Image (tube, coloured by chain):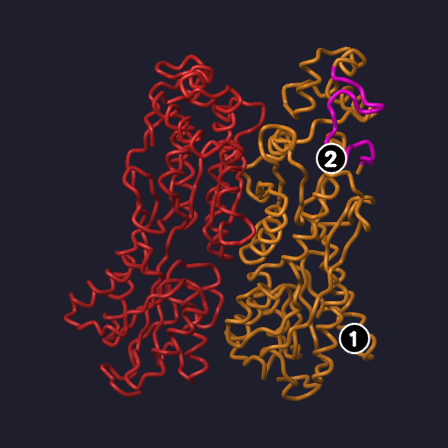
Chain colours: A orange, B red
Amino acid sequence: MSSSTDRDAAGAVPEKTVKGAASISSIAAEAGVSIPTVSKVLNGRPDVAPDTRARVESIIEQHRYRRRRARQSSRPALIDLVFHEMHSAWSTEIIRGVELAAANERAAVVLSELGGEHRPRREWFDDLLARRPLGVILVLAGLDAEQRRQLTTRNIPFVFVDTAGEPPPGVPTVGSANWAGGLAATRHLLALGHRRIAVISGPTTMLCSRARVDGYRSALEDADVVVDPDFVRYGDFYVQGGYNHGMALLSRPDRPTAIFAGSDFQALGVMRAARELGLSIPDDLSIVGYDDLSVTEWIGPQLTTVRQPLREMATTAAQMVFSLARGERPPNERIDLATELVVRESTCPPREPNARVP
Amino acid sequence: MSSSTDRDAAGAVPEKTVKGAASISSIAAEAGVSIPTVSKVLNGRPDVAPDTRARVESIIEQHRYRRRRARQSSRPALIDLVFHEMHSAWSTEIIRGVELAAANERAAVVLSELGGEHRPRREWFDDLLARRPLGVILVLAGLDAEQRRQLTTRNIPFVFVDTAGEPPPGVPTVGSANWAGGLAATRHLLALGHRRIAVISGPTTMLCSRARVDGYRSALEDADVVVDPDFVRYGDFYVQGGYNHGMALLSRPDRPTAIFAGSDFQALGVMRAARELGLSIPDDLSIVGYDDLSVTEWIGPQLTTVRQPLREMATTAAQMVFSLARGERPPNERIDLATELVVRESTCPPREPNARVP
């Protein structure tokens, strides 16, 4: 994020009079291109030769040229919410959190999903720049260094919700206490008497997956339980992944008596695998999910899960974007909201503690 | 919808040269107001006296003044998707369908939810007008006559997905074959041997609820089964409503042996009520849902349901909006996509056919 101390209180930046900033014409002169070409680059239009674009971008960055904010135009403000992939209840919670914050600022929410093959990456990013949003919230979606630079140059702040990988330094991120969530889930199972506890998490490339597994490991280590490497599984956060890993784990002669799933959807998959194998929940298998989606209260048995405050995370991220757009710096670059274990019906003491064979 | 035959092939409408259209200045002169005042009304700005606004709107309408399309501006096109209330998996399907069509047209989707108290109706509509979307898709959300007129005046087409009530004549609507869905669900239960069949539908004010119940009635009449008035229930489409009605119905001594629920969420509520009353599904109670959300495949037992093609409905609605924005008229004002019964595990023959007491 570039500093924005030369804005006025309302976040307004006069186009040509900002201290230290260049006008379009002086940028054009310095780059040796026409004024319309500079304008095209500023608006993210694709019809500019790559080297020309790079030269203009570099001069813009040197001069910290400041675009008029979207707010100053005749159109109401927009905030972009970008999902790597939307997934039903989970996404709805995020959307609602952003909508809430946006309504307070009277901004409209533009929603995008990058997972589909129908939206080429470059085209999409050009359109994002051209619609000049007040800011961008990315959910498990990444930006490369060039894209981050282009947003920064245009004073379009961006905030990550969770992270698809190691967040770049200086990029504001809102997450939740994944490590503590994994710890709490596993401690709950240990307290019930379980020792053969497996974990099914999301992709290893996602920090949140790894943090939850590390919480699981720490809880087991504290209890002097040796972690069986085959009991630690990474996959995706979806039902089918939970089903597949659940089937593999529960078909073993020395199957686990408890499984900590990385998402409620994965837990649904594990529950289905257990049903197909004739295992009763929670008597034959205890299951803990992650997220606390509303469906977990309605299925039978109701799912014990780690509540992740998705809506509050999204509201916090949107508020950070609005603050940054006003030129304020967030008090912290990384905010993790608390997770909470919600005990329901899918966990109980193991039928035979330390059983090796069912 | 106003006709749009005076647009060119790309939907472009030159601001001041459209045949029969007035310029901003001539509208201002005719209304006896300033040019900025006309501009404010066109942009949906609130700071115009109501009678002035009404006079200007009326003159604009007479002259069929045509705004430049959003596409012609420097910003990429927007399409507005408006939910009365978002509800997890159901809304995600709709969003995905609209995103798909929008990506093909390289338009961005602005998402709004009207259910929250944080977005006052008038302010929201003013902002909608001011951001000049290519068009608007409304999901179970209504527009009053004045709002419809304001959109029509500005050449902003709108399409309803389903309808919150009787759709006004001439408003394009995409729905699904609700009556046929109710008929198919009930015929399936009759064919299994059920006679004591209850229905729990959505609000009576929604046409889709009433059509499903009418399909249910027709199936029962065809089979010479008398409809018990207390077996026909209206409520909402949510889990709690299904639970409450399910509890009431299943607590009766002459409880139904089968329930047709108006949504998969309602079916989840009925399943929970059955579990709490110690009734086994499908042996003691057959349940049919409506929608075919992905969760229905993962719960145990898997839910028999009526598949409603939500994603395709949303894509169709968005395509209609884009066609209308290009000045094309849709082949039909009302398009109903087919519904389909999906038989899974939650239905079977009744334990005691025609049982009066469990």
Question: Residue, x 70% and y 78% (percent of image)?
Answer: A189
Q: Relative to the observer, which residue lies in front, A191 or B231? A: B231
Q: What separation in Å lies between label 2 and label 1 (alpha carbons)?
A: 50 Å
In the image: residue B357, left or right of residue B316 = left
Q: Which residues are magenta?
A: A2-24
- The relative height of residue A19 versus residue B172 in the rendered view (above or below) is above
Give the dominant element type of the magenta stretch: helix, strand or loop.
Answer: loop
In the image: residue B315, left or right of residue B62 = right
- The relative height of residue A43 versus residue B339 in the rendered view (above or below) is above
- The relative height of residue B22 versus residue B286 in the rendered view (above or below) is above
The three-letter amino acid code for the residue at tag 1 is Leu
Instruction: Name the disc covering residue A220, or none.
Output: 1
The three-letter amino acid code for the residue at tag 2 is Gly
Question: Residue, x 27% and y 62% (percent of image)?
Answer: B213
Callout 1 environment at 10 Å: few (<14), some (14 to 19), or many (20+)?
many
Q: Position of residue A63 (x, y in %)?
A: 83, 23
